[in-house]
Structure formats: C-alpha cells, structure tokens
C-alpha cells in the first residue's frame, strides 16, 4: 500500500526487513504453541484462550499505533499477535473437541482448519478493500493499512468478553478433581438432567480417560503438573516406535510447509506483481481470488478424506503442485524481463498459482493435520500432535524469513526450489508414509510394527471397567436400547 510504503520505506525496500516483519509472527507462534499445552493444563483451556485473545488484541493495536520512524511497533505487534495465535492454536481445537458431543467432534475439529482458511480469505479481501481508502495513490489515508489490523482485533476482543460466559472444559474439570462441576457442564451442554444415562456415559468416558493417563504414566502421576507435562513430552522419544511416529508427524509438516504454500499466502501480492500484474490494486485483487480458491478447494477434501485415503490425496496434490511450480518457473525465466509484451503468459502463471493453491487446499491442507492427529498411540497422542504442530510453526518461520530475498535474487529459481521439495515429498509419501485411513489403534500398531497402541487399548478397556462405564453401557443396552455398543478405541481417540 502506498501510505505504508511512505511511512516505512526501510521495511518495504529491504527484503531482509520484510522477511523479519512476516516471520516474527511465526516466532511468536512457536512460543505460543509450545507453551499452550502446559498453560492449558495448569490454568484451564478457558483462561488460556482468554490470555491468547489479550495477546492478539495487544499485538493488533501496537501495530496500528506504529507511525513513521516507529517501525519497532510493527515488529512488536506482529510478535504478540503470533504469540496469541500460537497459544490459541494449541487450546482452541482442544476446547472445541472436549465440549462437543461425541458425534460432532470430528466435524468441529475439521471445521477449525476451514475457519482458518476462511479467515485468510477475509483478510485478503479486507486488504483489497482498504487499499481504496483515500485513493490508491499519494492521497491514500493511513487508515488504509491500519484498518486490517483494527478489524483483526475485533473478534479477539469479542471472544475475550464472551469467554467469561463459556464453561470450563469437562475434561479439565475432571483432571483437577471438580467432578460435580464437570457433570453439570455436560448436562448443560447436552440439555439433559445430570442423572441421564447419556450424560453419565460421557462423564465416565472422561473419568476413564483420566485414569488411563495416570496408568499410562505411572512414574509421573505424583509429580507436579509442569514436571508431568515435560515427562510426557520426553516419553515421545523414549522408544524407537514413538520416535518413528514423531518423525513422521514432523516430516508431514515439513513437506507441507516446504511445498511453498505459505510463501504464496504471505507474499501473494508480491508474487503477482512479479508475474507482471501492474499496479498494487490488481495484485491485491488476484490475492483476493487466491483466498476464494483456497476455501472452495478445501470443502470437498473434508468430505472425501475418509473415503479416498490419505496417501492418494497427498500424491495427487503433490503432482498438481509440482507441475504448477515447474511451469510457473519456466514462464518467469522466459518472460520476466518483458511482461508488458507477454500479458497472456503472466496471466497463465497467475492461473497456475491458483491451480497450485487448489491442489494444496484439496490435499495437503486438511490431510496433513489429520495425519498428525491420528498416527500416535493414546498415551502420547496430545504431546505428539503438539510436536507435529510445532514443526508447522518452525518451518513456517523459516519460509516467511527466507522467501523475500529468494524472490528478489532467485526470481524464477524460487518456484523451481519449491518444486524440488515437492518432488522429494512425492517419493517420501509413496515409499515411506503409511496409509492410516480408518485404522484402529491395533491396526496403527501394525503400520508402525509396534505394540504400543495395543497396550494402550487394553489399559483403556481396564479403565472403562474400573470407573463403571462398561457396566453402565451393559445396563443401558439391556434396559432401554440406549447403548452406543462396546466402546471402540476410535471413539476415545476422537475425543483426545
């Protein structure tokens, strides 16, 4: 934007400064995501989300308060915003899953990814619209670049206020010994009496999960919360089986990020300008279309992922993205010095970028997060998934930092660079990534050639029996037909 460029020329005209301004948000996200699990256990999911909202509000309005000669506020604002987003990414989906009815958990967890992409799309169009405030040239108002950040803080403020009217997570309440409050919360959420069998079944499921966790980590049960949390992280690396699963989760996110997706998302406007779209407004419009393509392509993936399987989707997506990057690289190499005479070539490259986005949105976007959430045994699932998520943030940070100088120095080579990673990713998915579609805990053990999941399933069944859940289900099944049948491992997995 014109006014932003005039106010902060040292940031805009330095690829290193631009990289830092973008990547400092990811730096905050790394800190937030890694601390989310610990804070969520100590202070509750509810209060941790409130803290996350406060960080986002602070970051948004520090950014708004920056002016010429005060670029440091831009960096501080971005860092605190990232801290809040990272913190929320660790507890938000968990809170949703723990409050949702069992039959709604899968939908709500996958909706989190959809909501993230929806937010990206909205931010693109807000940027496009605000670019017109005061005009697109020298008359442009400072509100043009400040408005997106002002709007960013509004949902965070609304949630920070509304969260005080929301209940604590029943799972957290059980963990801290507030069982009666947990039952009341479940009854309120389900709109049923506390003594209703469905409420008691869900409550006893949570009790069984808490007992399972204690038995799965007998040496840490008596330690403080902080030591207990770190001991559970250490357990992710205690056996070769666990280590293999951690590596798989880390590499899934590594290849997701080094496909170049966030290079396009973060620097879409710059990318489109480099492809010959003259004028910032046209580039912003193309960026807005990118957001639409992203969200439209994601919806079908949510519907077919359990029918098609993980590997086929990743392979098809990788091939589409690889070919798109290679062709864009060739087009840029051939025409980058004379775009005005080759407008059609420029728009072809833009269309291929949109195809690349669609390929990612329909495959790597939702599939990678699904894989990370399902490959771990119950005993290390939460911590293993958080390690996988940290891979996303760490690699995201590297991408955001290095891409601006790459686009400036390498130009067409940037696209070939990401194409190479996509090619390596194709071979890794084909020959090393296991297919996990519809795999139970025992089946996942066979995939990784271990017995951890089988042991966890046995511990879980014992915990369900000891808290009285097995007896309640048997009584309900024989008495009024309300039984959900034997408690499958998948149902427990869904709620972890």
Image: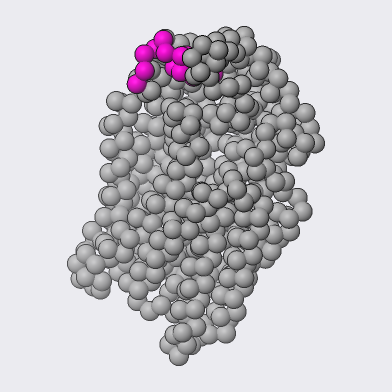
Q: The C terminus lies in which quarter of the figure?
A: top right
Please, is residue 334 above or below residue 232 in the view? below
**Which of the 4 image quadrants contains residue 190?**
top left
Specify the principal SS of the magenta part: helix
Is 396 left, or right, of 160 in this rendering? right
Q: Residue at x 47, y 70 (%)?
A: 271
Q: Residue at x 55, y 79 (%)?
A: 332
Looking at this rendering, what residue extends furthest in the bottom direction?
341
Where in the figure is residue 438, as x and y percent of width and height?
Answer: 64, 40
Does 202 appear in magenta?
yes
What's drawn in magenta, residue-wise? Answer: 191-205
Q: Residue at x 61, y 41 (%)?
A: 372
Which sits in the foreground, 189 or 36?
189
Please, is residue 252 above or below residue 130 in the view? above
Where in the figure is residue 349, as x and y percent of width and height?
Answer: 51, 76
Where in the figure is residue 6, as x and y percent of width and height?
Answer: 30, 67
Please, is residue 319 above or below residue 365 in the view? below
Number of marks: 0
Which sits in the foreground, 298 or 29?
298
Q: Residue at x 51, y 18 (%)?
A: 481
**What's the colour scheme?**
one colour
Where in the figure is residue 66, as x and y percent of width and height?
Answer: 30, 53
**Which of the 4 image quadrants contains residue 377?**
top right
Q: The N terminus lies in which quarter of the figure?
A: bottom left
Does 476 appear in magenta?
no
Is residue 264 shown to the viewer in this render?
Answer: yes
Is residue 79 shown to the viewer in this render?
Answer: no
Is 336 left, or right, of 244 in this rendering? left
């Amino acid at each position: 934007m014109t006014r932003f460029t005039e106010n902060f020329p040292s940031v805009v005209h330095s690829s290193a400064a631009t990289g830092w301004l973008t990547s400092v948000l990811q730096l905050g996200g790394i800190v937030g995501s890694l601390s989310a699990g610990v804070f969520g256990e100590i202070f509750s999911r509810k209060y941790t989300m409130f803290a996350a909202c406060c960080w986002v509000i602070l970051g948004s309005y520090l950014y708004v308060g920056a002016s010429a000669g005060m670029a440091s506020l831009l960096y501080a604002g971005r860092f605190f915003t990232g801290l809040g987003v990272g913190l929320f990414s660790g507890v938000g989906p968990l809170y949703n899953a723990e409050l949702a009815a069992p039959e709604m958990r899968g939908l709500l967890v996958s909706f989190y990814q959809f909501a993230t992409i929806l937010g990206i799309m909205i931010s693109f169009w807000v940027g496009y619209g605000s670019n017109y405030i005061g005009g697109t040239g020298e008359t442009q108002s400072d509100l043009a670049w400040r408005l997106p950040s002002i709007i960013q803080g509004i949902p965070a403020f609304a949630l920070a206020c509304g969260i005080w009217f929301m209940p604590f997570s029943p799972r957290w309440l059980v963990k801290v010994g507030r069982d009666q409050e947990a039952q009341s919360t479940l009854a309120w959420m389900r709109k049923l009496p506390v003594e209703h069998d469905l409420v008691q079944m869900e409550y006893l499921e949570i009790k069984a999960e808490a007992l399972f966790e204690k038995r799965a980590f007998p040496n840490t049960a008596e330690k403080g919360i902080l030591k207990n949390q770190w001991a559970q992280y250490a357990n992710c690396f205690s056996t070769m089986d666990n280590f293999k699963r951690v590596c798989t989760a880390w590499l899934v996110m590594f290849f997701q990020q080094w496909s170049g997706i966030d290079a396009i998302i973060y620097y879409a406007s710059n990318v489109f300008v480099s492809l010959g779209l003259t004028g910032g407004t046209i580039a912003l419009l193309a960026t807005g279309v990118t957001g639409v393509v992203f969200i439209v392509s994601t919806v079908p993936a949510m519907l077919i992922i359990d029918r098609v399987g993980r590997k086929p989707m990743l392979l098809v997506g990788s091939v589409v993205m690889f070919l798109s990057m290679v062709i864009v690289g060739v087009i840029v190499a051939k025409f980058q010095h004379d775009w005005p005479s080759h407008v059609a070539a420029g728009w072809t490259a833009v269309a291929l970028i949109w195809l690349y986005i669609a390929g990612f949105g329909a495959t790597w976007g939702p599939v990678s997060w699904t894989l990370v959430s399902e490959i771990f045994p119950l005993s290390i699932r939460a911590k293993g998934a958080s390690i996988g998520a940290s891979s996303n943030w760490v690699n995201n940070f590297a991408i955001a930092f290095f891409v601006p100088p790459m686009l400036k120095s390498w130009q067409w080579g940037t696209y070939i660079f990401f194409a190479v990673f996509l090619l390596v990713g194709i071979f890794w998915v084909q020959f090393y990534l296991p297919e996990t579609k519809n795999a139970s805990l025992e089946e996942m053990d066979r995939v990784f050639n271990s017995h951890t999941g089988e042991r966890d399933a046995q511990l879980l069944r014992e915990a369900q029996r000891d808290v009285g859940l097995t007896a309640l289900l048997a009584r309900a099944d024989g008495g009024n037909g309300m039984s959900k049948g034997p408690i499958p491992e998948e149902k427990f997995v869904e709620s972890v």
